[in-house]
Structures are given as structure tokens and as C-alpha cells.
Image: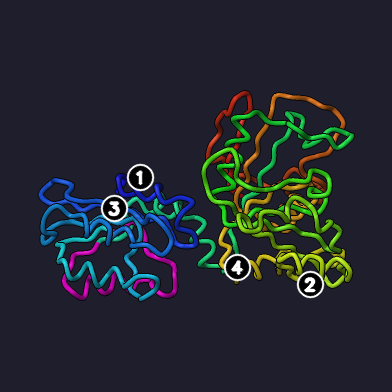
Amino acid sequence: MKRALKLASKGEGRVSPNPMVGAVIVKEGRIISEGYHREFGGNHAEINAINKASEAIGGATLYVTLEPCSHYGKTPPCADRIVEVKPKRVVIGTADPSPLVSGRGIEILKRHGIETEVGILEEECRKINEIFFKFIQTKTPFITLKFAQTIDGRIATSTGHSRWISSEPSLKFAHKLRSLHDGIMVGAGTVLKDDPELTVRHVRGKNPVRIVVDSTLRIPANAPIFKNQERAKTIIATTHRHSKKRLPQLTDAGIEVLIIDADDKGRVDLKKLLIELGKKKVSSILVEGGSEIITSFLKEKMADRLVIITAPKITGKGIDAVGDLGIKRMDDSINLSLIKVFRKGDDIIIDARM
């Protein structure tokens, strides 16, 4: 199962919104085949392993990180194909939470007399697909908050200058993180101040959908974030308070504009925005700032993951990474579960879960 998990991770960034899955086939103590889900719309891990088998699978054991599917989607049901090749045993890491599967694949295998065991390295198998599990169960995207800060917690100086807080290795890491998410989100203030492209440039990988939260459509139609639509699509989320003049300029340029209900402060209601993005099959979003939108996600408890890049620099007075959360007592602070702490160049990176 550990080998199957390692194989599954090879599909990272290429199979979304499907899960990453790995499979290994063992016969008489020998691995006779293995496979993984390579890309969205392609064969699933079990089918790739079956097709590559060096000998008959009858009597073998199939190890797979996620319950085999039992329905027709982009491909035929994996459970039916497994039954055809007659393995003696199937060992499954974790059940599939999708209502289209959810135990049906396991039931098919057992009904055809295949010994089936579920729950091997289950925590690891769920963890590798934390995005898939969140999206399937809530129909809203998995949210990663990411920001670079000085060691005293500033994302910019008192004048608003922020380039560059982190090191070159950290910048490459940040672009890799972009490539692993379906969408990347910033507020209008970040676009107006930094003029970002929000594309993947320092590593190989796909460009996420660029999502800008702009309650009144302040961003000019010629901003860099609206360029290269063929390479990276841009969605603007606004409210009914939007500029009536700016809206046709954006739509004529091929920019998708979502008009979302406002919250009690007249800003885009982020919870309602995430529901709409979920309908568009955006299963994960990297929120890159600025401080206002990061604070909103934390205050509303809508974040799942937090990635903080801390540079060994001190600016003193400046712009805080996180604003007022309304917390008055330390007992009420947001607790994080540290998954990984590591270095990139001179920077320390914390990867945590809420």
C-alpha cells in the first residue's frame, strides 16, 4: 500500500477534480504490475495496472489506495474490470466518499467472491486526497491560504512595498503550489497594488483559474491579470454594487463576471462565492492575499490549509499578514496542526491544517 501511495502522488496536479490513486498487483510475493491515475479523463490506476500486467492476474492480490469505481463516467467501472480478471484478493486503502461509489465498488467485488479488505493505511490514503474528500463531501473548494511574511509578521512595509520578502527558492515553491490548485484567488487591492499575473512561470505546471474578488469592479480592464486568457482564465467576483460602466468592458474582453450577493459589509459574500465556484468544478483554491481577504477566510473559518513563508527579515511597522479576528482571549485563538516545517533558501515554511 505504501508503494501504491507513492505511485498515486505522481498524478498530483494532473487529475483534478478526480482523486489521485495508485495500484499494485502482487502474485506469489512478486509485483507483477503497477499503475496510477495519470490524468483527468484517462484510465484509472487499477486499469493501468491490469493492462500492464506481465502475467495472468488470477489468484493475485490487487492493492489500491481508493475504492474502485462502480459507475460509468469518463471511463467504464473499474470494479467490473477487476471482476473480469479474477484476482483472489483486493486490498483497499479507503472507501470512496462519492455518492456515485460509496461502498458499491466494494460490494461488487465481494458479491463475486473476491476477498476484499478495506482500511489499510487509511489515514494516509485519505490525506493524499484531502482536496477530493473535502470537495466531494461539501461541494465547495478546498482552501489553502498562502502568504510570505517577515519574521515580525509583515507582508509589506509601512509604504506598502513587498517585493520581495521571500527568497528565490521560496518563489519557485510558491509557483509549484499554484500549479497544484484549480484556482488562485486575490482581492482587488492586491491587483491594484502589485499588478500580478498569477500564472505559473518559475516551474513547469498548469495555470490555475485566476479569481479576483472585486466588490465594485475597481480593477481597470487593461490590468495584466486579464491578459493571456487562452493560457489562464480569469473570473471576477463582484456584487450588485459593481460599476455599470466597467462590466461590459470586462465581458467584451471575454472575462467571466460572477455577481454574488454582498455580505453585511457590502463585500462579496465569500461563502456564496465558494458555492458558485464549486458548481464550476473548481475543487481547490490557493488564496494569495492580501491581508483583508486572508483575514476574512480565517475569521469565517473557511480555510483548510495554511502555508506561511517566513523570511529572516524585520521591518518594524508595516502591513500585518492577518488583521483583526476579533479574538480577545488566548483561549479563543485559532489552533493549527503542523504538518511540515522546512526550509527554502533562508526562509522557514510552515505547512499546517486548521
Depth-wise, is mark 2 or mark 3 nearer the camera?
A: 3
Residues at marks 2 and 4 touching, judged by CB atoms closer than 8 Å: no
* Residue at mark 2: 261
- Number of residues whose C-alpha sits closer than 10 Å to that of mark 4, classed few (under 14), some (14–19) or many (20 or more): some
Which callout, 1 or 3, points at the residue further toward the start of the chain? 1
Depth-wise, is mark 1 or mark 3 nearer the camera?
A: 3
Residue 85: quarter of image? bottom left
Which callout, 2 or 1, points at the residue further toward the start of the chain? 1
Question: Closest to the observer: 90 or 221?
Answer: 221
Residue 209: x and y in percent read: 63, 57
Rounded to the nearest whole Å, what is the CA distance between mark 2 and mark 1? 43 Å
Depth-wise, is mark 3 or mark 4 nearer the camera?
A: 3
Which callout, 2 or 4, points at the residue further toward the start of the chain? 2
Residue 179: x and y in percent read: 55, 48
Point out which mark residue 6 bears. Answer: 1
Point out which mark residue 35 bears. Answer: 3
Query: Dot 2: what SS?
Result: loop
